[in-house]
Image (cartoon, rainbow, N blue to C red):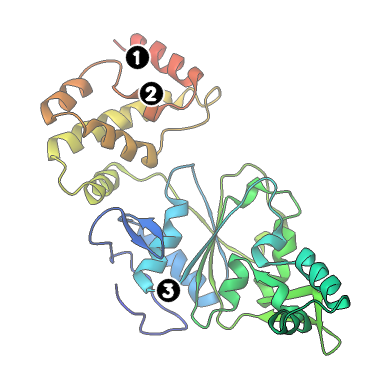
Amino acid sequence: MVSPVNKDYPKYTGRVQPKKSGETYQGKLIYPYLPSKELIDAVNLAIYLKRPLLLRGEPGCGKTKLAIAVAYELGLPFEAWYIKSTSRAKDGLYTYDTVGRLRDAQLAASGSLTQAEKQRFDDPTSYVRLGPLGRAFNNDKRTVVLIDEIDKADIDFPNDLLLELEEKIIKVEEVRVDDQEMEISAKAAPIVFITSNDEKDLPDAFLRRCLFHYVKFPKSQQIVDIVKARFPDIADELTKKSVSRFLELRELMAEETGRSSKKVSTSELLDWIQALKQDTLEEALRKLSQKPLPYLEVLLKSWEAHISYLRLSEDTE
């Protein structure tokens, strides 16, 4: 990895890759990531302007993997916040141990606290537990933060992050210091990546605070490069044949998007090639020359898609 020349505005190049696929960085698996020039430019603009970068694109196109790739190249801390339908904006900022505070208050009233417990009770900030964005704010180094699939949350979720994203301040409403609400100001502005699968529209006020980039499905040569980066020992013949059949499948299924909107993605392609690699080269190439394609359960994720593919395959024979 290379250290950024400018700690305030490090430059992402997309050229620094892990020495081997599947190594770990700060506890996260990391694989080679080959961004487009347009995506690299968008990342560097977000770093410079200190604005979140909102990433949209087909599921499986690499939106989520970008954040850890940036953190790896720049040698920066990484925090991930995976959004669920039940997630609240506050969860990624901090949680307050109300139960622990109440318990200690009862023990204090009965005189049962140890000296260490009394020190904790006397400091209300000790009951604050920082979430991913809160930890990034509290880090002296610029931290890469991934807020993944923000559109899974309630519609009010993005608006509840406006203050934090705009002013880089977290207000802890449960704690007052010198008669003022406790505030956590970012020691270094985090580099924030937010992904969305377009499950719902995001509020205009939230969008105004973000930069935007649509991660396009890669072209044929880019896909070949991605496959070779993930599987350095793969035979050229297998790469060429599997990518060709994969693109045929995408084109074949394109007319079925009304009934099966989930398109096969680069993520599924890589899993599919991993499945093919369990066979000998000769066996894998033989299977790729037949219909239907092998290991369809890796590529097609609904029964309707399977039925459509089998019907379309028969029509093209």
Instruction: Identify which amino acid the numbered label 3 is placed on.
Output: Leu
Under circle 2, the secondary element is helix
Q: Is residue 284 above or below residue 219?
A: above
Mark sitting on residue 241: none
Which residue occupies 50% across, 32% down? Answer: 262
Instruction: Identify which amino acid the numbered label 2 is placed on.
Output: Leu
Q: Earlier in the sequence, mark 2 or mark 3?
A: 3
Q: Earlier in the sequence, mark 3 or mark 1?
A: 3
Q: Quadrant of residue 248?
A: top left
Residue on which disc 2 sits? 252
Q: Is residue 9 above or below residue 242?
A: below
Under circle 1, the secondary element is helix
Instruction: Identify which amino acid the numbered label 1 is placed on.
Output: Ser
Which residue occupies 58% across, 83% down? Answer: 187
Q: Earlier in the sequence, mark 2 or mark 1?
A: 2
Screen quadrant of the C terminus: top left
Whether residue 205 is visible to the viewer of this picture, yes or no, is: no
- Tell me if label 2 and label 1 are in contact, CB under 8 Å: yes
Residue on which disc 1 sits? 313
Which residue occupies 32% across, 54% down? Answer: 31
Q: Residue furthest left?
A: 282
Residue on which disc 3 sits? 76
Q: Position of residue 281 (x, y in %)?
A: 13, 31
